[in-house]
Image (spheres, coloured by chain):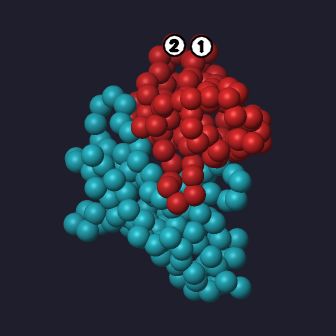
């Protein structure tokens, strides 16, 4: 089946550690996104990539980093510089061409700092 | 800047009754409007979207939404609610322009369908 796979589903991190969340898609979409979801705040854009080897900061990029070495993969690293990383993280992708094209989401990853 | 407002944090409706989840937007130019649903601990699932044409858009699971340009609204509706419709609903807006256009999401409305 085509879709977006995020792993792990649950991740615990000690303060001061970096962690990487995986996102893989087999939809052949060019554009990929990372969102953060906090209760009552909707979704906030962390980073996006429209094409391989290129990515742009979103609204809340501080403390995060990404790479886009392959079309299928867009991993997100939550660094120790992110002051409040506990959240639900959603990866998404969209086919090219129009802003009217639908964004498709993965199942999300919970990150908890302990 | 574009924005989406979902004025109700929670909507309660009895099973079998019609439901409405409200959404208003602000964007320059022509809007693209989306509704998504999220079940607990899951990703967002696409329900329907308005791009152009008929103001009444039909989507998945019997949901529909009406685009009202004068009121800048895109309310989600369903004629008869099911308990299984209980979830978190997000409205989103983008705009009709070339290149990358940001998608802005509302804060979500929790729908509770009471048996």
Looking at the image, the residue that sits furthest to the front is A16
Task: Please state the horizontal and vertical placement of residue B67, each as a whole percent of the image.
Answer: 34, 63
The quarter in which the C terminus of chain B is drawn is bottom right
Task: Please state the horizontal and vertical placement of residue B64, each as a whole percent of the image.
Answer: 48, 67
Nearest the viewer among B94 and A27 is B94
Residue B53 sits in which quadrant? bottom left
Location of mark 2 (residue): A53
Tell me: A88 left or right of B75.
right
- Determine the residue positioned at 61% across, 15% down: A70
Chain of residue at mark 2: A
Residue A2 in view of the camera: no
Residue A105 sits in which quadrant? top right
Task: Please state the horizontal and vertical placement of residue B1, each as a whole percent of the image.
Answer: 27, 46
Calculate the distance from the C-alpha at mark 2 to the C-alpha at mark 1.
6 Å
| Chain A image colour | red
- Determine the residue positioned at 49% across, 25% down: A49
- Determine the residue positioned at 57% across, 81% down: B12
Nearest the viewer among B40 and A41 is A41
| Chain B image colour | cyan
Q: Are marks 2 and 1 in contact (CB under 8 Å)?
A: yes
Residue A53, above or below B20: above
Location of mark 1 (residue): A69
Residue A11, above or below B65: above
Residue A107, above or below A50: below
């Amino acid at each position: 089946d085509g879709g977006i796979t995020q792993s792990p589903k649950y991740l615990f991190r000690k303060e001061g550690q970096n962690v990487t969340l995986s996102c893989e898609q087999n939809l052949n979409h060019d554009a990929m996104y990372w969102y953060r979801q906090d209760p009552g705040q909707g979704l906030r854009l962390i980073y996006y990539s429209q094409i391989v080897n290129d990515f742009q900061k979103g609204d809340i990029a501080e403390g995060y980093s990404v790479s886009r070495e392959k079309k299928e993969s867009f991993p997100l690293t939550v660094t120790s510089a992110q002051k409040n990383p506990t959240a639900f993280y959603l990866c998404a992708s969209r086919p090219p061409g129009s802003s009217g094209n639908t964004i498709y989401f993965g199942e999300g990853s919970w990150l908890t700092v302990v | 800047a574009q924005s989406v407002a979902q004025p109700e944090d929670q909507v309660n409706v009895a099973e079998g009754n019609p439901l409405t989840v409200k959404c208003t937007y602000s964007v320059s130019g022509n809007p693209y409007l989306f509704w998504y649903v999220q079940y607990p601990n899951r990703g967002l699932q696409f329900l329907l979207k308005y791009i152009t044409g008929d103001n009444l858009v039909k989507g998945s699971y019997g949901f529909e939404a009406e685009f009202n340009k004068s009121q800048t609204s895109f309310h989600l509706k369903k004629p008869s609610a099911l308990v299984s419709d209980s979830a978190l609903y997000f409205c989103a807006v983008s705009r009709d322009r070339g290149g990358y256009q940001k998608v802005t999401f509302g804060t979500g409305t929790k729908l509770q369908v009471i048996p």
